[in-house]
């Protein structure tokens, strides 16, 4: 079990659906910057889903994926013995899916959103750091990235207003 705490494997991911989801279907196994790869996972998902559903359906799907993430990250965190293991990237994926919903579909806007989201997720300005340290469950794992998404959207809204 100690080996799982250090380096979960494909065998671990495939042992339970929660592990596969929490690790972003393998994106979290990337040895360097797994959170970045978890965030990148949102892009093809967005491009696949967004044209096929209306706005309400998309937002409902994000809510469902958020709830699924609470469960998957809680189960997986307990299994690896680390509440917010670095390889658990579903939180980044779902939060960035939310960001992409509100950001113009232009590549420049999406790239700016990606960079801002990663910065907020990495540096965790208040209250993100507080939530990250306080809530040690699947909800806590998902919550801090939701706040990073909110910060990203605020900065992009200000930028869009200034550019108009």
Image: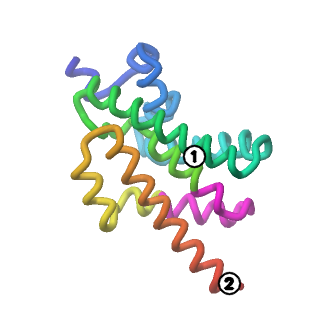
Magenta stretch? 99-117
Q: Looking at the picture, how far across and down is residue 159, in whole percent?
A: 60, 79
Name the residue rendered at 43%, 20% in the picture: 13
**Residue 150 higher or lower than 145, as above or below:** below
**Label 2 Cα neighbours within 10 Å, binned few <14 / some 14-19 / many ≥20:** few
Q: Distance between the residues labelled 1 and 2?
A: 26 Å
The residue indicated by pointer 1 is 40
Name the foreground residue: 127 vs 35.
127
State if disc 2 and disc 1 touch (CB < 8 Å). no
Q: Is mark 1 on a helix, strand or loop?
A: helix
Labels 1 and 2: the sequence-earlier one:
1
Task: Describe residue 4's horizontal placement relative to residue 111 as left or right.
Answer: left
Colour scheme in use: rainbow
Q: In this view, does 34 lie above or below 81?
A: below
Q: Position of residue 161 (x, y in %)?
A: 64, 82
**Viewer-nearest of discs 1 and 2:** 2
């Amino acid at each position: 079990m100690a080996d799982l705490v250090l380096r979960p494997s494909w065998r671990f991911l495939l042992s339970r659906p929660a592990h596969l989801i929490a690790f972003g279907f393998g994106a979290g196994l990337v040895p360097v910057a797994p959170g970045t790869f978890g965030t990148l996972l949102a892009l093809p998902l967005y491009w696949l889903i967004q044209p096929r559903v209306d706005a309400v359906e998309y937002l409902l799907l994000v809510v469902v994926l958020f709830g699924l993430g609470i469960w998957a990250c809680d189960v997986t965190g307990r299994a690896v013995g680390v509440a917010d293991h670095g390889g658990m990237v579903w939180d980044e994926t779902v939060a960035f899916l939310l960001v992409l919903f509100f950001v113009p579909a232009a590549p420049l806007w999406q790239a700016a959103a990606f960079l801002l989201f990663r910065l907020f997720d990495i540096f965790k300005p208040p209250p993100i750091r507080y939530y990250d340290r306080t809530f040690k469950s699947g909800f806590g794992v998902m919550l801090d990235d939701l706040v990073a998404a909110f910060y990203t959207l605020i900065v992009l809204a200000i930028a869009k207003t200034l550019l108009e």
